[in-house]
Amino acid sequence: MSPNNIFEHSFYGIYDDDSMNAFYEREMSKLNGIIAKKDLKIEELEKKNSVFKKRLTKYYKQRHFTIGDYVSENDKLDDKLVKVEEERDHLKLMNKKLTENLSETERKIKKEAAKLAKSEIDSQIYFMKQEYEDKINTLEKLEAEVELTGTIKDLLE
């Protein structure tokens, strides 16, 4: 046999004392063992699935729910979700409008406060000027009195 022949006995672990049939029988036996293990696992999983289905069916029956009930409940929840999203969007819009109104009100308040501050400053300046003029008039009167007193004193002496 050539070394490149994939059916060469040594490739499969077959030596001169083994026959091809014995080799195939051993391989088939190994595969049958693996298949049997897989079959046992499948049976075990089918049993578990059956128990789960029974429990699930019992659970649904206890709760008197059907698929239609779940669908209608899901539809109701979807409707509620849509309503809540609409409310949220409406509230966002109201919040935006309120924020704009607040900004406008803040601008008006700042403008009015600036006007009030300016008028307050103007009135304080006006009153300070009045006080200053009153003090100057008083000083002029006092100076006139001092001069008059000085003149009277000079005359008396």
Image (cartoon, rainbow, N blue to C red):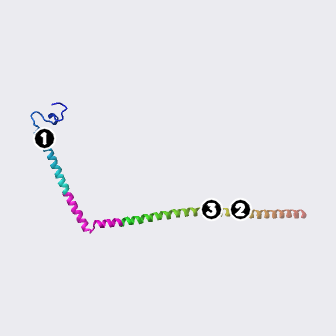
Which amino acid, mark 2? Ile
Q: Earlier in the sequence, mark 3 or mark 2?
A: 3
- The answer to whether residue 57 is magenta is yes
Residue under label 1: 24
Q: What label does residue 111 carry, if any?
A: 3
- Residue at 65% across, 63% down: 115
**Between 101 and 13, which is closer to the camera in this rendering?**
13
10 Å crowding of disc 1: few (<14), some (14-19), many (20+): few
- Residue at 14% across, 42% down: 27
Q: In which quarter of the image is residue 129?
A: bottom right
Across and down, in percent, residue 4 comes to 19, 32
Q: Is mark 3 on a helix, strand or loop?
A: helix
Q: What element carries label 1?
A: helix
Across and down, in percent, residue 112 comes to 63, 64
Q: Do we see residue 27 in this rendering? A: yes
Which amino acid, mark 1? Tyr
Left or right of residue 58: residue 23: left
Q: What stretch is highlighted in magenta?
A: 47-75
Left or right of residue 81: residue 58: left
Q: Is mark 2 on a helix, strand or loop?
A: helix
Q: Distance between the residues labelled 1 and 2?
A: 118 Å
Q: In which quarter of the image is residue 103?
A: bottom right
Give the position of the C terminus as an image quadrant. Answer: bottom right
Q: What label does residue 125 carry, if any?
A: 2
- Residue at 16% across, 48% down: 35
10 Å crowding of disc 2: few (<14), some (14-19), many (20+): few
Q: Mark 2 and mark 3 in contact (Cβ < 8 Å)?
A: no
- Taking the view exactly as shown, the residue that stands out farthest to the bottom is 64
Q: In which quarter of the image is residue 81?
A: bottom left
